[in-house]
Image (cartoon, grey):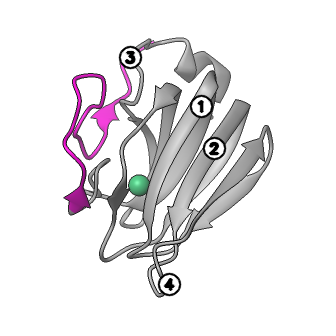
Amino acid sequence: VTGQPIDLTAALARFDQLWSPRIVARVNDYDVRIAKVAGEHIWHAHAHTDEFFLVLDGVLHIALRDPAGDGAERVVVLSRGEIFVVPAGAEHRPSAPAGASILMFEPTGTSTVGERHDPVPGHVDVTPGHPLPAG
Ligand code: NI
């Protein structure tokens, strides 16, 4: 066994790009990703997978549309240490007015914008996650 502990605070200090997740670990066929976020992401949905969020620092908002509903929206507000799971198929739009650092857990290859999404602005990285830069 060659693995070493990963300090998430140190890992976050190795990159600055917003809305651009870095893969810090793999668990079977899932990635553990961390990201720095600020401002708004875009409305999108992952057709085939749930998406797990843990807030490491700051406050993350996730706007949600009920997939079975009439388009009604709600916003969950997550503070440091709080988790939330966006169900597969649910349209969601993360945002962080004052900035946040987050951890996501989802199947390897999952795109940051899912399969259905609004037009992608320049500040949103379309990616299945990048390797963490060497420290
Ligand atoms: Ni998502």
Q: Position of residue 1 (x, y in %)?
A: 50, 49
Q: Position of residue 12 (x, y in %)?
A: 55, 20
User: In the image, which is nearer the foreground, mark 3 or mark 2?
Assistant: 2
In the figure, residue 5 lies in which quadrant? top right
Q: Quote the CA–CA distance across marks 2 and 4.
A: 20 Å
User: In the image, which is nearer the foreground, mark 3 or mark 1?
Assistant: 1
Q: Badge 3: how crowded within 10 Å, few (<14), some, or many (20+)?
A: some
- Above-or-below relation of 100 to 134: below
Q: Badge 2: how crowded within 10 Å, few (<14), some, or many (20+)?
A: some
- Above-or-below relation of 41 to 105: above
Q: Secondary structure at mark 3?
A: loop
Q: Are marks 4 and 1 in contact (CB under 8 Å)?
A: no
For mark 2, what is the residue?
A: 61
- Above-or-below relation of 98 to 76: above
For mark 1, what is the residue?
A: 96
* Magenta span of residues: 116-135
Foreground residue among 58 and 28? 58
Q: Quote the CA–CA distance across marks 4 and 1.
A: 25 Å
For mark 4, what is the residue?
A: 69
Q: Badge 4: how crowded within 10 Å, few (<14), some, or many (20+)?
A: few
- Above-or-below relation of 73 to 117: below
User: As shown in the figure, which amino acid type bears the numbered disc 4?
Assistant: Gly
Q: Are marks 3 and 2 in contact (CB under 8 Å)?
A: no
Q: Secondary structure at mark 1?
A: strand
Q: Position of residue 108 (x, y in %)?
A: 31, 58
